[in-house]
């Protein structure tokens, strides 16, 4: 059988991305002999990470390094991202995306990136999700955090709270629900998913007493999605987020659709921190990522937990195998 190949963008060279990448690969190259890896990052940061972990890139089978940049020691120093490191992160990410779009890799796995540093270096950058949508020419994608205890997708991603009411349109919520439901069937193997959709306001608006978004947009969007999906998918909501996440945690639902970023991430990080994977749904390519940040405060100390990168790689492998089996 031909190898499955994953393209990896290690993220910020000043953070823990290179370290968790080399640590995870040391474990997974042995576990998955049918998988190869193409690692995109800064040459010096990758070498430093291997030395920090007492590992050798050259000793890992089926791992190929692609140095997108060669930063100076000062520019890649552990800690807060430098200006040059901000530019390097985007170069590595785009190189990894190009590898997948060219068909030489089956999935993309991304390490943690410093969005502010990328923007300071000259390219406005809201996040991986938005950048991937633009690079792949897709109008709408959905961010999902998938962990062992909770799956939750987001109807909006990196938006100021003040813009939420105007951005959460009927169409936006409907598309999020549809993409979530279809991805649960296609990628997660759940033929009849049960999904609960959160409200935006406290207690889902209390029948309009605390806001009308549930009445004007979210509720109608759920009805639209229900008509499009048919009886195989159970849709419930809009429900207050506190109730929705409690019931999902107890196994009542297969996924929660959140209305905004922190509504989802607080629940995900409380229940599954370190084990959850950030998945971009709705792309023509497979993309998974760690659900943690750059770890600037612990970078260069050799103590970063590799569990998040292991989980992201494992899920990408599972998705790639599933896509191959249905090709």
Image: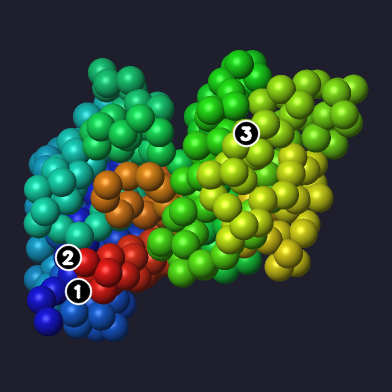
Quarter-wise, where is residue 218 in the image?
Answer: top right
Q: Name the residue under label 1.
A: 35
Q: Is residue 254 above or below residue 166?
A: below
Q: Depth check: 17 or 207 in front?
A: 207
**Tag 1 near tag 3, CB within 8 Å:** no
Q: How is the image coloured?
A: rainbow
The quadrant of the rendering that contains the C terminus is: bottom left
- Indicate which disc residue 5 carries: 2
Q: Mark 3 points at which residue?
A: 221
Residue 280 in percent (x, y) is at: 40, 47
Residue 208 in percent (x, y) is at: 85, 23
Q: How crowded is mark 1: few (under 14 residues within 10 Å), some or many (20 or more)?
A: some
**Tag 1 near tag 2, CB within 8 Å:** yes
Mark 1 or 3, nearer chain start:
1
Mark 1 or 2, nearer chain start:
2
Is 256 situated left or right of 90 in this image?
right
Element class at badge 1? strand
Residue 170 in percent (x, y) is at: 59, 27
Is 238 situated left or right of 271 in this image?
right
Element class at badge 2? strand
Q: Which residue is drawn at 87% across and 29% down?
A: 207
The quadrant of the rendering that contains the N terminus is: bottom left
Q: Residue at x 29, y 76 (%)?
A: 28
């Amino acid at each position: 059988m031909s190898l499955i190949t994953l393209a990896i963008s290690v993220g910020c060279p000043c953070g823990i991305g290179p370290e968790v990448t080399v640590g995870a690969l040391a474990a997974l190259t042995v576990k998955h002999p049918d998988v190869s890896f193409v690692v995109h990052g800064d040459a010096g940061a990758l070498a430093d990470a291997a030395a920090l972990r007492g590992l050798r890139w050259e000793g890992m089978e089926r791992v190929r390094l692609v140095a997108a940049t060669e930063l100076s020691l000062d520019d890649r120093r552990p800690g807060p991202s430098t200006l040059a490191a901000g530019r390097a992160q985007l170069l590595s990410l785009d190189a990894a995306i190009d590898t997948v779009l060219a068909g030489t890799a089956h999935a993309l796995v991304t390490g943690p990136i410093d969005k502010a540093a990328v923007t300071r270096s000259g390219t406005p950058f809201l996040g991986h999700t938005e950048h991937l949508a633009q690079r792949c020419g897709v109008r709408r994608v959905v961010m999902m955090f998938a962990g062992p205890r909770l799956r939750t997708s987001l109807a909006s991603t990196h938006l100021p709270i003040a813009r939420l009411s105007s951005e959460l349109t009927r169409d936006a919520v409907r598309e999020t629900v549809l993409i979530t439901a279809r991805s649960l069937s296609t990628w997660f193997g759940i033929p009849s998913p049960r999904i609960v959709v959160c409200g935006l306001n406290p207690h889902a608006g209390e029948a309009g007493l605390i806001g009308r978004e549930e009445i004007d947009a979210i509720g109608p969007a759920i009805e639209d999605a229900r008509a499009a999906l048919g009886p195989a998918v159970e849709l419930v909501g809009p429900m207050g987020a506190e109730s929705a996440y409690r019931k999902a945690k107890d196994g009542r639902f297969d996924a929660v659709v959140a209305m905004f970023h922190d509504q989802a991430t607080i629940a995900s990080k409380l229940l599954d921190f370190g084990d959850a994977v950030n998945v971009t749904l709705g792309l023509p390519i497979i993309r998974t990522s760690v659900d943690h940040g750059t770890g600037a405060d612990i970078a260069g100390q050799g103590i970063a937990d590799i569990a998040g990168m292991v989980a992201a790689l494992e899920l990408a492998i599972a998705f790639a195998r599933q896509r191959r089996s249905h090709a």
